[in-house]
Image: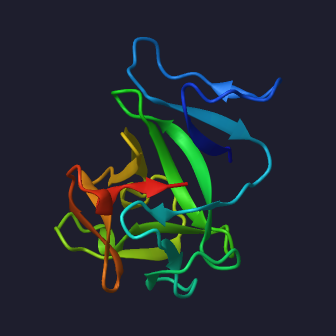
Amino acid sequence: PNYAFLLPLDTPLPPGTPVIAPPAGSHTLAQAIVLQEREASKLRNAQSGLCLAPVAVTNGSFLGVGDCRPDQSSWTIEFTSYDFEGRPVVRLHPLVSANKCLGVIGASTAVNAEMVIWDCVDGAPNQYLTVMETSDGYALRANHSNLCVTPNDRGASQQPCNADNNQKWWF
């Protein structure tokens, strides 16, 4: 698989960095830089400054939101495609278990459905997230429900997308 970092368009790229161009005519505000090696990123909430991390890496494990620790709160970003508006679509893998993915429990489309860790399944719609650039971070929208990843007291759930800082994440 290809792994990606998302950067503002004005970010200079090292010479020779392979880039997947967005579809012609798209209005994407992010670049997907394709890397052949796995790179880790923290998923830090813009409002709290805390990081999203799996509590465990067994199927159905909930997430925690807490201090950013390199051993637990690092994620690999797998670029998969672009959506119809030219925004990157990704899957997030906990660094500690590359064959697991962040997804919505039971592929639920309900508001408040929890985000969990599960075996990665190609084509499982609840494991694909559209990355939407905001003024100071990225919103992560679940493709199957059109709801956004939002921290809560248990970890994270999906909620209606809005412009609040609690739905903005930094990689």
Would you say 113 lies left or right of 85 here?
left
In the foreground, 102 or 64: 64
Q: Residue 12, relative to residue 36: is it above or below? A: above
Can you tell which quarter of the image residue 65 is in?
A: bottom left
Say how the picture is coloured.
Answer: rainbow
In the figure, 96 relative to 150: above or below? below
Total numbered labels placed on residues in the image: 0
Residue 93's image quarter? Answer: bottom right
The picture places residue 95, in percent across and down from the top left corner, at 67, 69
Q: Residue at x 36, y 40 (%)?
A: 135
| Residue at screen point 40% across, 18% down | 26
Q: Considering only vertical position in the picture, is 104 above or below 21?
A: below
**Horizontal side of residue 146 vs 70, given as left or right:** left
Question: Which residue is rendered at x = 39% and y = 70% of the image?
Answer: 48
Residue that appears at 79% across and 29% down: 14
> Residue 171, percent across and down?
55, 54
Above-or-below relation of 161 to 117: above
Camera-side residue of 119 and 26: 26
From the top left corner, tell me how far across and down residue 22 is, in percent. 51, 23
Would residue 164 be found to the left or right of residue 89 on screen? left
Q: Position of residue 20 (x, y in %)?
A: 62, 27
- Residue extending furthest top? 25
